[in-house]
Every structure is written in C-alpha cells, then in structure tokens.
C-alpha cells in the first residue's frame, strides 16, 4: 500500500494530505499553527460574580423551566446514579440534575416533517407523558410559557400570541413530547470557583466518571429516539463547544437529531466497507500507526491525529466488535469515554470544538466502527479554499499529535484523566479495530 498517496511531508515542511475516506485535499503549511494549547485566562475574559445555584443561561440549574419539558434526568441518590423519566413540573426542584435530556426549542428536522412525509404518529408512551405533564398546574403553566417564548422568537407579536387559545398552544407543544431533536445538558455552566467568564465547564473539565455518565446518558437518548419513531434511519449525535463551533449557549450540551436517511458521509463510507470490510483499519488505524500519528489508546479505544481534515482533527475509534454505541458493554463505553474525555481535557476549554459521532446505521448490514471526530474550529476556510478545493489546515497531523501528547502526560500525572496509554506506550498492532468480526 502506498501511504504517500494520502500523506506527503515535503522538504520545506508542507504536509499534503488526502483524506482516504472523503477525498478532501488538505495542506498544512509550516508556521501557521504555532500557538501552543493554553488554559491561561484570555485577555478578553471578564470577571464574573458567582451565583449558587447557577443562573447564567437557560440551561442553568436555576432556570430549569426555560427549556421544554424534561424527558429524562440523571441524579445521584444515596451515592448512586439513577435515571428519572418523565418527572412532573412539580418534581423539578426535588432533585438536582447531573444531566438533563430536553427537547430542542427549534428543531432542525421538525415534528411536521415526520407527520407530513411519513404520517408519523406520536407513540402512546409519549402521548401519555404529555397528558400527565399538562395535567398539573405547574406543568400546564410551563408548557404555555415555552410555547409563548417559541412564538415570540419566531416573530409573532404579543397581541397575536394572546389571541391563540390554550388548546391550540397545547397542540403546538406536541413537538416537545414527540419530536426528534433533543439536547443532553450538563449540570454546570462554570467550573468550581470560576473567576472569569472563560472558566467554562467543558467536557474535559468533567471527571472521567462524570464524562462516562454523560456519554452513557446520550447513548440512552439516542436509543429512545429510535424506539419512538419507526421511520428514523439514523440519529446524528454531535456537540458544538463555544460559538465559533456553532454553539448558541456556552453551557455544555450535546445534540441528537433524528433523520430518515444516513447522509452522504455514512452512505459513501458504507460503500467502502462493502468493498473492503477492513477499510477502517487499513486507511484509519493502520495508516495512522505507520505514520506515527497515534496519540493514545486503552484496551477499548484508540485516538490518533486525522489526515485530510479542514480543521485539526483527532479521531477516536472504538476497538469493539460491536459497531453501535448501544451494543457496547459498559466497559467498552467507559473505555471510549475515557479516551474522548482525555482528548477534550488535553484540548482545554478554550478551543472551539465540534464532536461528531459515527456508527453503523440501524438498517445497515455493513458494520462501521463507532467513532468520533473532534475538530478544533480554530481556522476559517477562505477564498483560496473555495477556488481550489485545497484546504489549509493550520496544524499538520504530526504537530497536532505533538501539541496533545505532552498535555496528556501532564493530565495523567495530575490524575485528571483515566489511566490511558500515551504515544510510544501504545501497542501499535495491525488491525486494532475488531468491528469486522461477527
Ligand atoms: Zn448555563
């Protein structure tokens, strides 16, 4: 196999790359990405006044009623984690949510999309939840207030909103109970003892245990979305961290969007798997190993600097033979989570970042390994890229590895991340991903 087709470091230091899976052509030109990762307070940061409970945005603890009704909540009761489903509005204040699963106020794919295109009907479970929720005074008040907010944000005038009957508003609320765009919202806005508005609680600021719960809770949400709508063929899972990465809130959250198709990326890559079941080893982990791009691993997952991405990208793959997150064992999910957490922690909370999930679609008979791409949104593609379709990524894969690895050693020494193998400690064996096995 000719590796130079995908990766070619020229004498001046320019690294030309071709993404083996997408065909994206990327150059990393020396001298453009020398800034080290830092967790120093940025010059633009402003001092904050700490509030307990937090009330900085609509996702904060003191503002539970600013999101649509909660589908699920993770709590700690007597030292044990417990998931509470469909609590009533009256019960919101009885426990403190470690994580909340709530509908998105404005869905990317709306409830009407499913209703009008597929004759989708909200299942009994979710309708019962709706009826139970609006049967209490606080629940009804919450629903009307959220519908009013949504109408206002959609440009309706106060007088127009007043004229809409309660029954009509209750019918508008169907999307909160039976829609397919949801959020998993993390507990804290800021880290403990935050002083500046940049002291945000990112994925990497969690403990490994908190992060495992976050991933596990998100997998449960994804499964429930499948089970609630039989027309769903894929659930897109992603996390936008900070505004340059597309986040509308600085409060950590993941998003899940139900789709009736796989999308081009998954479809193209499934075609590659059909032709060569081992393609994710050959052009993924094996290639990364030959080029010394492996950053870290444990027994369940492996992380390496990705080739041919428009943004500096770290790819994290599950080694499991199970190819969907929901079929992973708890140990396997924890292993993935530990590595994802470690890379987020090494990136720090000031780098805008997209986390994208990929896995075998529900109706695919070709297995794709569960994997995530963490993309640092630190550069903006410009006119040069538009005209040439050659993208400039300011950090080459080797430089990306060299920025992340020392941070990982330090974090591991400080016991802020789980015990993972880093860089040269990794056992680089051929075909580490076992998804192709039955
Ligand atoms: Zn908040």
Image (tube, grey):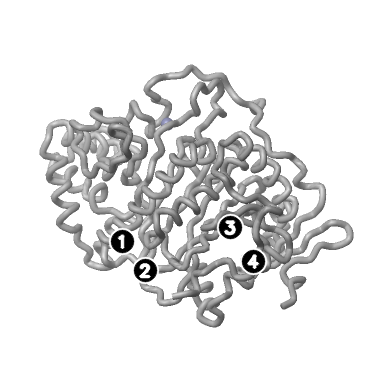
Q: Is label 4 in contact with label 2 (beta carbons under 8 Å)?
A: no
Judging by the rendered image, the residue that carries numbered circle 2 is 362
Indicate which disc residue 226 carries.
1
Nearer-N-terminus badge (1/3): 1
**Secondary structure found at label 2:** loop
Helix, strand or loop at mark 3: strand
Are the two marked residues, 1 and 2, in contact with CB atoms closer than 8 angstroms? yes
Q: Nearer the viewer, mark 3 or mark 2?
A: 3
Q: Nearer the viewer, residue 60 or 160?
A: 60
Q: CA distance from mark 3 to mark 2?
A: 24 Å
Query: Tag 2 or tag 4, which sits nearer the N-term?
Result: 2
Q: Which image quarter holds the N terminus?
A: bottom right
Which label sits in the foreground, 4 or 2?
A: 4
For ligand 1, give the image quadrant. Answer: top left
The residue beneath circle 4 is 429
Judged left or right of residue 49, residue 290 is: right
The residue positioned 32% from the left and 58% from the top of the image is 223
Give neighbour class at mark 4: few <14, some 14-19, many 20+ (Cα, 10 Å): few
Callout 2 environment at 10 Å: few (<14), some (14 to 19), or many (20+)?
Answer: few
Q: Are marks 3 and 4 in contact (CB under 8 Å)?
A: no
Of the numbered discs 1 and 4, the one sitting upstream in the chain is 1
> Residue 68, image x and y in percent?
28, 40
Instruction: Identify the secondary structure beneath mark 4.
Output: loop
Is the residue marked by circle 1 packed among few (<14), some (14-19), or many (20+) residues within 10 Å? some
Q: Could you give the CA–CA distance between mark 1 and mark 3, rounded to whole angstroms?
A: 28 Å
Position of residue 162 relative to residue 368, above or below, is above
Residue at figure coordinates x 40%, y 34% from the top left = 187
Q: Give the CA separation, mark 1 to mark 4.
A: 36 Å
Residue at label 3? 302
């Amino acid at each position: 196999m000719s590796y130079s087709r995908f990766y070619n470091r020229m004498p001046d230091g320019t690294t030309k790359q071709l993404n083996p899976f997408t065909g994206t052509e990327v150059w990393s030109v020396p001298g453009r990405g020398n800034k080290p990762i830092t967790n120093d307070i940025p010059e633009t940061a402003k001092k904050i006044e700490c509030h307990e409970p937090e009330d900085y945005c609509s996702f904060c603890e003191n503002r539970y009623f600013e999101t649509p009704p909660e589908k699920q909540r993770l709590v700690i009761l007597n030292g044990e984690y417990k998931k509470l489903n469909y609590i009533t509005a009256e019960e919101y204040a009885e426990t403190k949510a470690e994580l909340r699963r709530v509908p998105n106020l404005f869905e990317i794919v709306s409830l009407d999309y499913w209703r009008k295109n597929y004759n989708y009907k909200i299942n009994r479970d979710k309708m019962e939840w709706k009826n139970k929720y609006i049967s209490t005074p606080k629940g009804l008040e919450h629903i009307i207030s959220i519908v009013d907010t949504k109408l206002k944000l959609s440009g309706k005038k106060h007088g127009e909103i007043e004229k809409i009957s309660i029954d009509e508003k209750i019918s508008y609320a169907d999307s909160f109970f039976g829609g397919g765009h949801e959020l998993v919202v993390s507990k804290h806005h800021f880290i403990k003892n935050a002083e500046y508005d940049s002291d945000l609680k990112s994925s990497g600021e969690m403990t490994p245990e908190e992060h495992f719960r976050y991933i596990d809770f998100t997998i449960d949400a994804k499964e429930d979305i499948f089970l609630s709508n039989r027309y769903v063929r894929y659930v897109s899972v992603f996390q936008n961290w900070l505004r340059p990465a597309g986040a509308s809130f600085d409060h950590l959250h993941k998003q899940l969007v139900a789709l009736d198709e796989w999308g081009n990326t998954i479809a193209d890559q499934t075609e590659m798997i059909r032709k060569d079941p081992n393609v994710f080893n050959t052009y993924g982990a094996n290639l990364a190993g030959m080029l010394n791009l492996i950053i870290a691993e444990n027994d369940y997952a492996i992380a390496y600097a990705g080739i041919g991405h428009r943004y500096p990208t770290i790819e994290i793959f599950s080694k499991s033979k199970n190819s969907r997150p929901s079929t992973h064992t708890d140990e396997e999910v924890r292993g993935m989570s530990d590595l994802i957490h470690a890379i987020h922690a090494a990136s720090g909370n000031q780098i805008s970042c997209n986390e994208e999930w990929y896995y075998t679609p529900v109706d695919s008979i070709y297995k794709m390994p569960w994997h995530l791409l963490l993309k640092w949104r630190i550069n903006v593609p410009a006119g040069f890229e538009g005209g040439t379709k050659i993208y400039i990524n300011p950090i080459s894969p080797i430089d990306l590895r060299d920025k992340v690895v020392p941070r990982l050693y330090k974090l591991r020494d400080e016991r802020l991340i789980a015990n993972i193998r880093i860089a040269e400690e990794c056992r680089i064996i051929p075909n580490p991903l076992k998804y192709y096995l039955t």
